[in-house]
Amino acid sequence: MKNIFDRMHIAGKLMTVAGLAITLLLLLGFSSVVIETRSTVGKLSDEAAIAQADAEGNQVKTDIAAFEATARAMSSALGKMHANGTHDRGVALAVLKTDLLQSKTALGSWTMILPDQWDGPDAGKSGAPGSTSNGNFTPYWVKVNGVVTQSPLNEPGAYEKPYFRRAYDSGKGAIVEPYAYDVNGKSLMMTSIAHPVRSGERVIGVAGMDMELGSISERLGALHPFGDGRVMLLSSGASWVANPDPAQLGKLYAGPGLDEVRAALASGKTKVLTDLDVNGVPTRRVIKPLTLDNLNATWALVLDIPEATVGAPARAIVWQLVLGGIVIVGAVLASLFFAARNIIGRPISGLSEAVDRLAGGEDCAIPQLARRDEIGTMARAADVFRQAAVSRAEADQRAAEEQRVVTTSIGAGLDALTRGDLTAEITTPFPAAYAALKNNFNAAIGELRRMIGAVATSAGGIRSGSLEIAQASEDLARRTEANAASLEEASAALTQIDQRLKTSATAATQTVSRADEALRTVSSGRATAGEAVAAMDRVSESAKGIDEVIEGVDKIAFQTRVLAMNAAVEAGRAGDAGRGFAVVADLVTALAMRAEEEAKRARDQLTVTQSDIVTAVDAVRRVDSTFETISGGVGEVHMLLGEMAKDNQAQSTAISQISVAVATMDQSTQQNAAMVEETSAAARNLTTEAISLNDQAARFETRGR
């Protein structure tokens, strides 16, 4: 390698050294930029994937939460109905059927009451609605194509199944692992959400609804983040709820990263797995846990993005940098080659040729004598050698006059050359012996004139090129500053969105508080309605007692009239002696008849009062039922507002993270702008040097007289 380098021309050596140095610097700079770009792109991709997973996860949670609220309201209604003394199994069946018909995604609604806990002993009630052969109250409504049918749950060991035990043992809402269920010959993925049925403080059973998961799976399967990604869903037991491959539905997660999936489900923290081999494709996998409120369970949203998709922007930047580096290295090497060839290579070649000719005994002009660098020193040394040789050859031949003419002419030429006048050729006739010296001198002046002209032209070209580079760098700096300003505006806009989301979350929280007050008001109204019903019942009982009293008064009046009639008969028998008794008997009879009439009027008034009391009791009970419906609706509104507040908080957090990423990009753009400014300054320095070189070349007069 050293021998090859030694055999190179100076231009080749300069190009080799400069090319290696520039290439090394570009490689170092490009490597730093590529590493930073890959890191930044990876972080931004992860943040975007997590944000999309948050959005889709919130939608899944909302779907399940709406279904859970329906199941919870159904179990609450059954518990309150039982606590209020309504133990009619037909009424309970109507509640289950109503909730099933109102839900679009429900496949079934059911309840399982512990034996002998609904309306007394179950023995002998096998024929009751929703009852098993041994009388247990376990009705199950099923909806197929909009048609609802009912049959009791007769599955052996049903009270030990997860859909009963999880909610009953914990006393809280529960969701079972998804399972396949055959409906009209079609296998559907579904799950059951159950809540305990509380009668007062006592749990008497479990009520639940069966949810069809196909719509969630289809919606997630239609999503393709980043163009070719996919979105899936795992249950708390790490089995597939949604997967593009239908054969995987209901099966346990068996792909790479199983330990990380279990850790994410256990901790509830988002995890990002990189360089996973999924069907032979390097993939980046985001695992977003979803905490299902009121169900004591955590599911997980799984988002897959091919690593090739994530790394595409970084690869594009790498290729742009490589092409730009090749262009820069080529331009610099071409400039070095041109400068080395014309400034160093050709002058040395001409000087070497002149020395060779002098060594061969030939008298010739030495070029580059006017240069003040190393080449000029060598030229002047060669010229001294040439002059010594000429002096020795002509010592005995030339006359003093010839020497004077020659030296005077050459002195004048050299003097003009010293002043930078490259047009001062020797025109004085020389003796024949010195004619060659004159010609060589004039030839040297001409060659030097052409070389300086070429140098001036090259300096002008370098100046023009450096000016274009400086202008391009300044344009790039301005565009970079504009991009930085745009990013800063985007960051400010994201900050405003974040503040508005926080304001919305605060308003939702205040609305939840107002909903709590409404619930307390409705509860107070229900208590008052209950007291009114009790008072009406007591009035009704009192009215029954008054009716018995009136009936007794009526009987007494009847007996009194009978006695008066008997007294009148006896008075008639007594004749004149009994006339006074007859008058008394008539008065008693009239009094008894009036008593009967008043008792009849009192009974009629009491009948009307009893009818009004029954009407009032029914009205109060309807008011109580309305209050119960309002309470359930306000409860659902309370829950939905809470979910809205949580969603707003999550969106605010995502916007804050995006703001940080935009701020980071803004800082990087500012740094790039500073680097472009430095490049522009370097280009301006190059322009200054080119102008200086052009000024130095302009000192020489190269135009003919």
Image (tube, grey):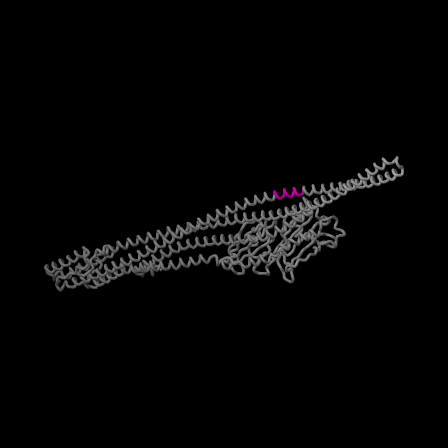
How far across and how far down the image is residue 607, in percent?
Answer: 73, 44
Q: Is the magenta stretch mostly helix, strand or loop?
A: helix
Q: Can residue 49 be seen in this view?
A: yes
- In the image, taking residue 317 as reference, residue 220 lies left or right, namely right
Instruction: Name the quarter where the N terminus is drawn.
Output: bottom left
Q: Report x, y in % for residue 438.
A: 16, 62
- Left or right: residue 379 versus residue 601 is left
Q: How many marks?
A: 0
Q: Which of 106 and 316 is in front in this view?
A: 106
The quadrant of the image that shows the C terminus is bottom left
Residue 170 shows in the view: no
Please tell me whether residue 524 belongs to the stretch shown in magenta: yes
Q: Position of residue 4 (x, y in %)?
A: 34, 61
Q: Which residue is drawn at 37% across and 59% down?
A: 326
Position of residue 71 in the picture relative to residue 366 (left or right): right
- Using the image as rendered, state which of residue 571 and residue 536 is in the foreground: 571
**What range is drawn magenta here?**
521-530
- Residue at left offset 62%, top offset 47%: 630
In the rendered image, the residue lying farthest to the front is 576
Q: Please determine whether, in this image, residue 667 is positioned above or below residue 575.
A: below
Quadrant in the rendering for residue 331:
bottom left
Whole-percent x, y for residue 270 in the image: 54, 51
Q: Nearer the viewer, residue 426 or 86?
A: 86
Magenta stretch encompasses residue 115: no
Q: Residue at 46%, 58% (x, y): give it.
A: 312
